[in-house]
Amino acid sequence: MGKVVVTEFITLDGVIEDPGGAEKTERGGWAFRFEGGPEVETFKFEELVQSDAQLLGRITYEGFAQAWPTMEGTGEFGEKMNGMPKFVVSSTLRDPAWNNTSVLTGHLAADVGALKERFDGDILVAGSAQLARALFAHDLVDELHLVVYPVILGAGKRLFADGAELPLKLLDARQTGAVALQVFGRSE
């Protein structure tokens, strides 16, 4: 049975998405302005290799679908991103262009339960703030991977709303050049 793994780049103040009007670089938003080092690249590659499918929200999907099929020089990582099954939770997306993509429009818990039965490896949820919150609300997340950047943005979309409670246990932590990789599982 597969596990749902939510993975996020996050600031010390809990921001996972750019505040409106944030400076963007050629590669993307705030996280790409900071050097994570080869350890982060290795971690993200290992995370992807352990995954059999991706589960994405529409906004993250559209960004990935625009970028990944056209990126050159991405090697095994890019081949895996482009080739693996992708599932988008959306009530508005009708005809996804990125290969191996299906749209989930039914009941989230039932759809994710079916994916967990279908795949043995991880089902990776990258970014997708609204979807991640819904998965946590339905108790569908098995692991949470946080790549913590030592920066405070002061504004932006946070992973958890004020007042949210979620008991977790630390499974692994690694320090890299500029960030810490933290892996949490459900607290039993």
Image (spheres, helix red, strand yellow):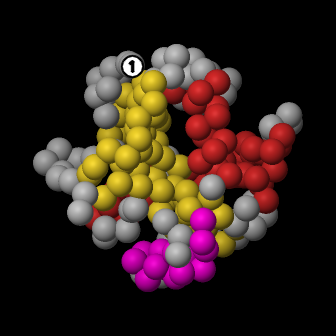
* Residue 89, position as x, y percentages in the image: 52, 67
Residue 80 place in picture, x, y as percent:
76, 53
Q: Is residue 119 above or below residue 161?
A: below
Q: Is residue 66 left or right of residue 6?
A: right
Between 60 and 169, which is closer to the camera in this rendering?
Answer: 169
**Number of marks present in the image shown:** 1
Q: Which residue is mark 1?
A: 150
Q: Is residue 105 visible?
A: no
Q: Quadrant of residue 104?
A: bottom right
How far from the left and from the top, in percent, is residue 87?
61, 67
Establish if 59 lies above or below 26.
Answer: below
For residue 124, side relative to residue 173 (left or right): right
Q: Residue at x 13, y 48 (%)?
A: 163
* Residue 36 visible at all: yes
Q: Which image quarter is the C terminus in?
A: bottom left
Residue 62, given in percent of the width and then of the height, sits at 63, 52
Classify residue 174 by image quadrant.
top left
Q: Is residue 116 magenta?
A: yes
Observer-nearest of 41 and 62: 41
Q: Horizontal placement of 15 versus 65: left or right?
A: left
**Which residue is farthest left?**
163
Could you tell me the amino acid type at mark 1? Pro
- Majority secondary structure in the magenta region: helix
| Location of residue 102 with respect to 34 vertically, above or below | below
Q: Is residue 159 magenta?
A: no
Q: Residues within 10 Å of mark 1 (few under 14, many from 20)?
A: few
Residue drawn 58% across and 30% down? 40
Q: Secondary structure at mark 1?
A: loop
Residues in magenta?
Answer: 108-121
Q: Please name the residue shown 60% across and 80% down the image.
A: 118
Q: Is residue 77 above or below residue 147?
A: below
